[in-house]
Amino acid sequence: MHMIDVNPTVWDRLLAVRQGRSCTCCGRWSADETGALDLYGPLARRDLGPMVVAQIGQSLDGRIATVTGDARDVSGPDGLAHLHRMRALVDGVVIGVRTALHDTPRLTVRLCEGPNPARIVIDPRGRLPDDAPLLARDGTRRIIVQAVDRPRPDGVEVIRLSDRDGMLDPAGILTALHATGLSSLMIEGGGITISRFLEAGLLTRLQVAIAPLLIGGGPQGLTMPSPTEKLSEAIRPETRAFSLGSDVVFDCALNADALAAREPLHARPARAVRS
């Protein structure tokens, strides 16, 4: 278990890495500061090309809400701070329309310093109302990916894609978002949306934050559209555990790019951003 210390000096360094002005490998750091740089550094880097991380917060028994849908306090205070740090380090945050309608999130950075990410909703049928909180005009990019010809308020970008059985192809969504200049993306919710990107093999890394509570029922964190029937075929990522304080986060590397992001920045040459 790695401990972390996200003090102002560490966080300033991570924001500088995000801006391409620094690295996480130089300097003298304590063990806990190094843990923080190891956890967040891969999200801050932009030298390895496009990156897609998913984050989900859940209880010890794998629930993300109660049977009535109450999900507000699943993550502890340190788990929420972790989520806001992740938002500050990526270019854009993606959620499904059901999460947008049920939770009415703002998707802004409030529990740490840093820029707000672009707010992106996957809304095939155009169900999201125009007065949704995440569409508020505040200078941050707002993007809706939809399959219908529905106009949106001025300033809201619309990506029109073809659907299949009411669903949009995750690969097509990522291709379209990368084409708008968003290289680093976080799939924040809900569990079904994350699972579709995971099963499609499109995630660079997955972070599962566990809070120390037992809910006993309610929706599960991740449910794959086509779950494996054999444990020998299950996804077995290379995983590290970090103590956030109130929560524990498991950082899962899902491909070679995720492992490369753990290497010191100066240990490998930068490569061109892939389209």
Image (cartoon, rainbow, N blue to C red):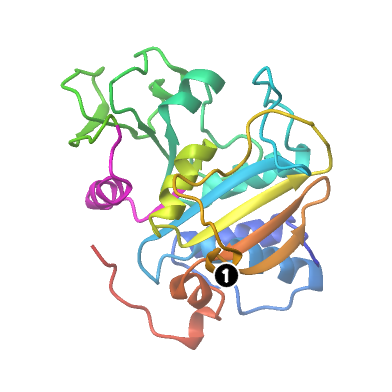
- Residue 241 at what x, y percent from top left? 73, 63
Q: Quadrant location of residue 231?
A: bottom right
Q: Is residue 212 left or right of residue 197?
A: right
- Residue 204 at what x, y percent from top left? 46, 62
User: Would you say residue 13 is visible in this rendering?
Assistant: no
Task: Please identify the residue farthest to the bottom as the structure is shown.
Answer: 267
Residue at 28% in and 52% down:
178
Residue at 60% in and 44% down:
56
Q: 148 or 195: which is nearer to us? A: 195
Give the magenta-colored segment's residue range: 167-187
Q: Is residue 256 left or right of residue 157?
A: right
Q: Quadrant location of residue 110?
A: top right
Say which residue label 1 marks: 232
Q: Is residue 108 placed above or below 98 in the rendered structure? A: below
Q: Is residue 37 left or right of residue 229?
A: right
Residue at 49% in and 84% down:
266
Task: Please identify the residue farthest to the front as the structure is shown.
Answer: 229
Q: Is residue 5 placed above or below 27 in the rendered structure? A: above
Q: 269 or 151: which is nearer to us? A: 151
Q: Quadrant location of residue 30?
A: bottom right
- Residue 7 at what x, y percent from top left? 75, 56
